[in-house]
Amino acid sequence: MQNIRPTFLTILCILTFINSGWNIFQGIGNYTSSEVNAGIIQNQFEMIQDRIAEQEGAESMEKIIDAFLSSLTAENLQNNGLATAISSVLTLVGAVLMWSLRKRGFYIYLIGTIAGILAPMLIFGGIGGTFMAMGTAFFGILFVILYGLNLKHMS
């Protein structure tokens, strides 16, 4: 007798299919357009710096922005795009396997999630990399826990 996939696991997998697919395309896009993106980011932050410079006590904020901007190079954006695409492929493969009730998919998903969290911290470093990783970490850890609750249905 074949195991029946629980509705909750089905919903989790569908959400992962959508998110991972989106992130694969976004990662590829960021990889291929890193030069343009770096220029846009640089211009936006320069405008922000100009506004901040007019305010009292702006020196410390300017230092933070400069430190953040120095990590947002085209090369780092390209590396992060590649890391995003790769970690998203792993989470997608993991979700496909969990869709088929294969426990190995959970561990592949977990590896993809950990890679997606660590990549921005390693690539960008500092507080900027940490902030970038926080969004991924919140939903990634939440989904790992929710998938973990469904391990009993997988073999």
Image (spheres, grey):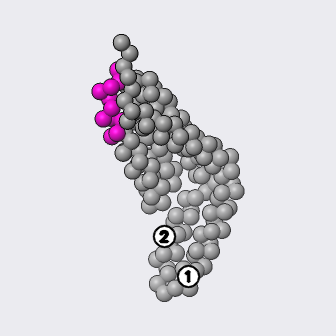
In the image, is residue 120 above or below residue 72?
above
Question: Which quadrant is the C terminus positioned in?
Answer: top left
In the image, is residue 107 above or below residue 22?
above
Say whether residue 152 is magenta.
yes
Query: Dot 2, crowdedness within 10 Å: few (<14), some or many (≥20)?
Result: few
User: Residue 125 at x, y = what percent?
Assistant: 47, 55
Can see residue 35? Answer: yes
For residue 83, what is the image quadrant?
A: top right
- Residue visible at 43% across and 37% down in the picture: 11
Q: Nearer the viewer, residue 40 or 121?
A: 40
User: Residue 70 at x, y = what percent?
Assistant: 56, 62
> For the image shown, how many numbered marks are present on the structure?
2
- Name the amino acid, label 2: Ile
- Name the amino acid, label 1: Ala
- Residue visible at 48% across and 75% down in the picture: 61
User: Residue 52 at x, y = what percent?
Assistant: 54, 80
The answer to which of marks 2 and 1 sits earlier in the sequence is 1
Residue 15 vs residue 33: left or right? Answer: left
The residue labelled by disc 1 is 53
What mark, if any, has residue 21 been given in the picture? none
Label 2 element class: helix
User: Residue 85 at x, y = what percent?
Assistant: 57, 40
Q: Residue furthest top?
A: 1
Residue 11 vs residue 50: left or right? Answer: left
Between marks 2 and 1, how big is the CA–CA gap? 13 Å
Range drawn in magenta: 145-155
Can see residue 122? Answer: no
- Residue visible at 57% across and 43% down in the picture: 22
Question: Which quadrant is the N terminus positioned in?
Answer: top left
What mark, if any, has residue 64 been given in the picture? 2
